[in-house]
Amino acid sequence: EIVLTQSPGTLSLSPGERATLSCRASQSVSSNSLAWYQQKPGQAPRLLIYAASSRATGIPDRFSGSGSGTDFTLTISRLEPEDFAVYYCQQYGSSPWTFGQGTKVEI
Amino acid sequence: EVQLVESGGGLVKPGGSLRLSCAASGFTVSNTWMTWVRQAPGKGLEWVGRIKRKSDGGTTDYAAPVKGRFTISRDDSKNTLYLQMNSLKTEDTAVYYCSETLGHWGQGTLVTVSS
């Protein structure tokens, strides 16, 4: 099973700042099959990024994904008030699919 | 518009069974890989399992904690996905979400396993 480790656990930033979230895999993620999700309290997760760097439909371009192999990054270029949430990475290249433990982005 | 609506959650005793439903609209469930994910209270996301689209064989795969107890299926005539949960344990308590793999999610349904 591929273990995904996200860091930091919590990121304290202000609106307008840049956020850099890390997701490290215990072994190489097949075909860069790595997704990022955003979850706000009381809501279902929302897909942001798939295939490591492709933005999902309707996702603003301030969200970008990068990386390959075992190291992946989600960058939010300029935080908007609505971006404060928990972010999860997920690998879907090898069974069982797995999630990271999440990074909370707070004000 | 794509919509997924889960139902069937509730309170069940340890060892009991429950079947969750996920009614889809705006797309065809049999043409899409579908996934179940759960989230225990105050915890992170946990992948439960997935079913491939019919053209890819329609096979299922499960996470180790639920393998042999949970079964994913679909009814094409109802455009609905199911999660049959047997031999439930207290640690299965969670909000259960269905989703298009790499797509839209439902709002979730709460399953509480307690005596």
Image: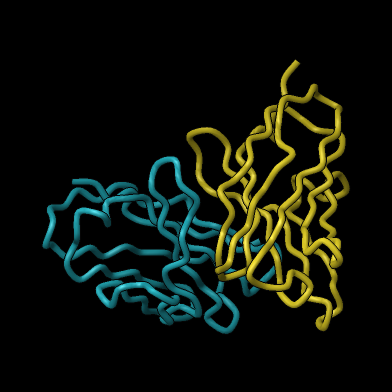
Identify the image quadrant of residue A41.
top left
- The residue that appears at 29% across and 47% down in the rendered structure is A10
Outermost top residue: B115
- The residue that appears at 78% across and 46% down in the rendered structure is B66
* Along the line of sight, the residue nearer the viewer: B81 or A8: B81
* Along the line of sight, the residue nearer the viewer: A60 or B75: B75
Image quadrant occupied by the N terminus of chain A: bottom right
Tell me residue A24's x, y (percent): 44, 65
* Along the line of sight, the residue nearer the viewer: B39 or A58: A58
- The residue that appears at 49% across and 56% down in the rendered structure is A100
Tell me residue B51's x, y (percent): 78, 66
Is B30 situated above or below B109?
below
- The residue that appears at 36% across and 52% down in the rendered structure is A103
Colour yellow, chain: B
Say whether residue B20 is left or right of residue A18.
right
Colour cyan, chain: A
Tell me residue B13's x, y (percent): 80, 22
Is B98 situated above or below A58?
above
Identify the image quadrant of residue B34.
bottom right
Is A12 situated above or below B75?
above
